[in-house]
Image: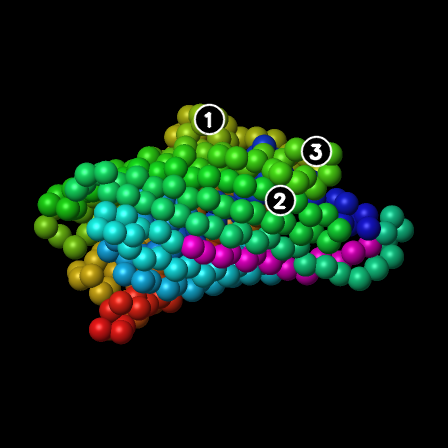
Amino acid sequence: MVAVAMLVPIFRASGQNGTSAYTFLDHPTSAHAFALGGGSAALIDDDVTLIDQNPALLGPEIDRQVALGYMHWLGSSNFASARYGMPAGERGAWAIGFRYLNHGTITQTDANGTIGGSFSPQDIVIEGAYSHDITDRLRGGIMLNAIYSNYEQYTAFALGVDLGINYYNEENDCSFSAVIKNLGGQLKRFDKRYDRLPFDIRLGYMQSLGSSPFSINITAHSLTKWRIGSYKHDKEKEDDMEVKSNFFGNLFGHLNLGLQYQPSDKFYIALGYNYKTKAEMSTYQRNFLSGFSVGMGLKVKAFRFNVAYAMPHKSGSSLMLNVSTSLGELLN
């Protein structure tokens, strides 16, 4: 039981410099967004998997779309998702979804080190989203997340809300977004301590480069604080950590940078860079690829396939897959 008792604060401290729990909510379910530096708040695509990036990216152009997703995260963590979205009148759309996160198998021991079995920490998110076109170029959206966590004998339940807005100029192929993520809190705690959701404010920008098939994608995250820093381990003192922080690291640590090549609406190749990931892996056997992500998408008739890959350090990598279809297009 000692290992179980230690697990809860470990999960609380993972990510966001230990200031909040539920940091798995920041993992994208879209391979397209993941390829562009780990997330994108302004990516324009008729793809229902993007709604956790910004609910205003949902729209009536999604015609009864069904999407399934899978992600192998670092170590033995595996995430799965399913979503369905459809129009709600001429100017609105709604979607429902499900996310399941399994963090691998952990050995359960007592104070003497005696093994008493094993367990798998799990998180489940039930979600619903709605968007509405305010004008021909401006769209707003809202997303509700019901979050259940089970870490052996410890359970918790929370509610979170995302609010987003997007401006898209189709003539110039230019997109701006603003998102408030994870408003809300716990209704049932793991124990006596209250854990916060990873509240965040994000801004997104996407712009095609002239008449070329290239576009840039920039998402600024963690905008509630300037000093973002990264942890550096003392090799002689394994339990001690110090926070590295400088102007350059703080500036670029807030940005996901992406470049996309899309010659048609049926195919794209995306490349992304995340400085914060590279900095955090500095003492974890990072390699040249740390911080970089790459992906591609292909549409064949009514089916869409997306894949993305990242390798933060030498002994661990992440792979994400999406497959989706539009029932309206498939049945016609």
Question: Does any portion of residue 76 appear in the rendered image?
Answer: yes
Q: Give whichever of discs 3 and 2 has the lower sequence position.
A: 2
The residue tagged 1 is 225
Mark 3 against mark 2, which lies toward the viewer?
2
Q: Give whichever of discs 1 and 2 has the lower sequence position.
A: 2
Give the position of the C terminus as an image quadrant. Answer: bottom left
Are there few (<14), some (14-19), or many (20+) residues within 10 Å of tag 3? few
* x and y, in percent, of residue 215 in the image: 21, 48
Q: Nearer the viewer, residue 92 or 101?
A: 92
Q: Give the label on residue 40, or none.
A: none
Q: Identity of the amino acid at label 1?
A: Lys
Give the dominant element type of the magenta stretch: helix, strand or loop: strand
Q: Give the label on residue 193, or none.
A: 3
* x and y, in percent, of residue 192 in the image: 73, 34
Q: Secondary structure at mark 1?
A: loop
Q: Identity of the amino acid at label 2?
A: Phe
The residue tagged 2 is 157
* x and y, in percent, of residue 68 in the image: 42, 64
Q: Identity of the amino acid at label 3?
A: Arg
